[in-house]
Image (spheres, rainbow, N blue to C red):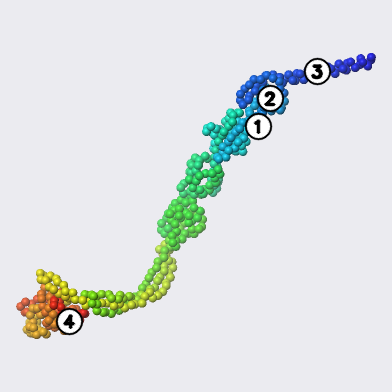
Amino acid sequence: MQNQASKTPAIRLLWISALLVLAGLVLILAQFFGDYALLVNGARRELRGWALTSGQLLRAAGYDWLPADEIFPAPAKLNLTHTTIILNQARPVSIQVGSEERTLLSAETLPANLLAEAGLVWFPRDILLWNSEPLRPDEPLPPGEPLSLEFVPAKKVVLQFAAETLSFFTQQETLGGALDEAGISLRPEDALSQPLDSVLTAENTISVRLAREINVRVGGQQYSGLSAAESVGGALRDLGLPLQNLDYAEPDESQPVPADGQVRIVRVSEEILLQTEETAYNNSYEDDPEAELDTVSVLVPGQIGLVVTRDRLLLEDGVEKTRQTDGPWKASDPEDGVLGRGTKVVVRTETINGETIEYWRKVSVYATSYKPSSQGGHTGTASGIPLTKGIIAVTLSWYRGMKMQPVYVPGYGRGIIADTGGGIPGRYWIDLGFDDNNYESWHFWTTLYFLTPVSGFIPVVLP
């Protein structure tokens, strides 16, 4: 009996402890029962219920979730304090990047984070479009709705100058448009590794050489201009002063442009001087029946002999620097020619002082005049005809072949060759006969016409 009595207080203590633990559990569990607010994709719903975790409460409200959903607080974590449960359900997101489409399942609402999930980095001047409207990277998108976005990444342009590098982003299509947009002004003489109308790609590295002043001295003149060329030759071309023929530059055109921009052009020219020594040729004569009397034709042309000496001069800015003499060498030998003496008689007519004459030969002669009194009153002639007007004297060499030939002298009239005289050396000469009472003094050149009929003897060459 004594043992039974001693056990009773211990059992009672055990039950009391159990009841206390149960009461504590009831009190704890009572904290998980109450009014909750569910925010599902931004829509609010009131719910009264009991749940240890936000996941239990969502299931009680009929919501299942995916790993990509956003749940606050965490669905498997004991919820002691939060009565507002947030569920942003993952939805399909399509991001078009050029010709590439990237898809993902995400509950994210911030554009920058969506791009990061798709492996895209947002840079300045990138464009993200939703329903053809641009979005800011921190502008929230509606949760729970499928999204179709277009990402237009900006093009990166890196300008490499001699001492610095400048980077910027642009949506412009061409390099020129990007530079204008960035407020970068370049002079026409500045050099770019790509032309301004180049279409930009995603990454563009452009080398820029800024033009500088170049001073070029040519002879006594000075030219100045801007050029970004690295070599002297390139700078000269930019200034419109390219080297020509034998010209050279100081420094040489292949060298870099000097730091002071000073260049000299030496104009080089070459002159060739020919000195000739001629050797005369001789002509022989032959009768030419096809040529008119008293004319000369060329049957075989003669050629002079030629010996040539050549000097080659090199001039720099007009000043002779070198001279080289070549030769002498024989360019040609003399070749004798053959001239034709005309023998063809042609009868012509001519009106002189109102009188028409018919002649077959005319010769320029120097005329003098004589009369009987100038010969001591003697009127005899070589032909025996007394001296009077119309008697014409010639040299003996003419007289032999022209005796009694009818002739005409302008200003004198008709006459015949009927006398001889001494003549004047070196000239064709005639002496016009007169009477003492009609004498005229002649001492000048005139023309002697040989009248028809044509003489039976015709000297081809007048003696």
Mark 3 vs mark 1, CA separation in Å: 43 Å
Q: Name the residue under label 3.
A: 20
Mark 2 vs mark 3, CA separation in Å: 32 Å
Is tag 4's residue or tag 3's residue first in the polypeptide sequence? 3
Check if mark 2's residue and mark 3's residue have beta carbons within 8 Å. no
Residue 145: x, y in percent?
A: 59, 29
Q: Nearer the viewer, mark 2 or mark 3?
A: 2
Q: Mark on residue 457?
A: 4
Say if 233 sits above or below 140 in the image.
Answer: below
Q: Quadrant of residue 346?
A: bottom left
Amino acid type for the residue under numbered disc 3: Leu
For this rendering, which residue is in front, 24 or 347? 347
Q: Name the residue under label 1.
A: 68
Q: Is residue 173 left or right of residue 117?
A: left
Q: Mark on residue 59?
A: 2
Secondary element under disc 1, as helix, strand or loop, is loop
Q: Nearer the viewer, mark 3 or mark 1?
A: 1
Q: Is residue 180 left or right of residue 281?
A: right
Is tag 1's residue or tag 2's residue first in the polypeptide sequence? 2
